Image (tube, rainbow, N blue to C red):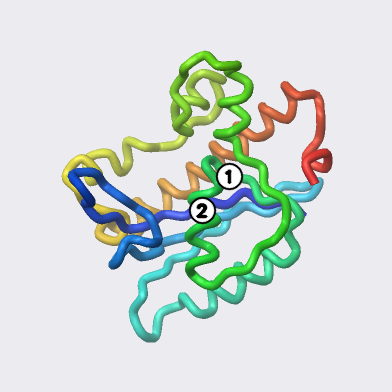
């Protein structure tokens, strides 16, 4: 099974810059979005991690870990960030990864370009993430934990869909298949 995955987190101000690292004290995992596929595409699943007693986080953790055990190729945009969070939060994954940001960097061949998910999708003229949903919050220093859940979920689902579109586009340009990355 292949899986597109994206996490949303809190962030702290460190030396005048926002830092969403799992290694900054107080930062927390807010949500994980994923889309599983083999030959058929499944709908995006979205999980909330609220860090409050009695929430669904433990159940979600078990579900996602079971998916990760089945996953042969984990796809994401800047997937190293998502993997840091997964591993720091006790998830287990040791399969192959496909990073759409790294592929865009390599395809640019040394030409400086916008490597954000939005920038890559805009350049490729494919489905883009819905960054406008959260930009006002982010500009005010409000992180995903404090943004209304419905907005976080809609934003996260759009990120998964955009990442899947970008990875499909790249695999097409490379004239290959996802199996070749295993």
Q: Distance between the residues labelled 1 and 2?
A: 8 Å
Numbered disc 2: secondary structure = helix
Q: Is residue 27 left or right of residue 62?
A: left
What residue does disc 2 label? 82
Disc on the earlier residue, 1 or 2: 1
Q: Where is residue 176 in the image (x, y as percent from the top left)?
A: 81, 30
Instruction: Give neighbour class at mark 2: few <14, some 14-19, many 20+ (Cα, 10 Å).
Output: many
Q: In this view, does 78 lie to the left or right of 3?
A: left
On screen, 110 above or below 40? above
Q: Which residue is drawn at 54% across and 49% down?
A: 80
The residue that appears at 34% across and 51% down in the rendered structure is: 151
Q: Quadrant of residue 133?
A: top left
Identify the residue at horizontal 63%, vertical 52% (top origin): 35
Q: In which quarter of the image is residue 65?
A: bottom right
* Occupied quadrant, residue 48: bottom left
On the image, the x and y values in percent for residue 165 come to 61, 34
Label 1: which residue?
76
Picture layout, residue 45 above or below residue 111:
below
């Amino acid at each position: 099974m292949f899986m597109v995955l994206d996490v949303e987190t809190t962030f702290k101000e460190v030396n005048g810059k926002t830092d969403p690292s799992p290694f900054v004290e107080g930062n927390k995992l807010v949500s994980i979005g994923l889309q599983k596929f083999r030959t058929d595409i499944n709908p995006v699943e979205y999980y909330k991690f609220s860090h409050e007693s009695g929430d669904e986080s433990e159940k979600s953790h078990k579900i996602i870990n079971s998916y990760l055990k089945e996953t042969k190729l984990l796809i994401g945009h800047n997937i190293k960030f998502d993997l840091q969070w997964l591993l720091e939060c006790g998830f287990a994954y040791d399969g192959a990864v496909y990073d759409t940001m790294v592929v865009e960097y390599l395809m640019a061949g040394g030409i400086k370009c916008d490597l954000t998910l939005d920038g890559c999708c805009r350049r490729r003229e494919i489905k883009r993430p819905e960054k406008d949903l959260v930009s006002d919050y982010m500009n005010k220093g409000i992180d995903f934990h404090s943004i209304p859940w419905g907005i976080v979920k809609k934003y996260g689902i759009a990120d998964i869909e955009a990442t899947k579109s970008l990875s499909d586009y790249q695999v097409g340009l490379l004239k290959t298949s996802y199996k070749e990355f295993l």
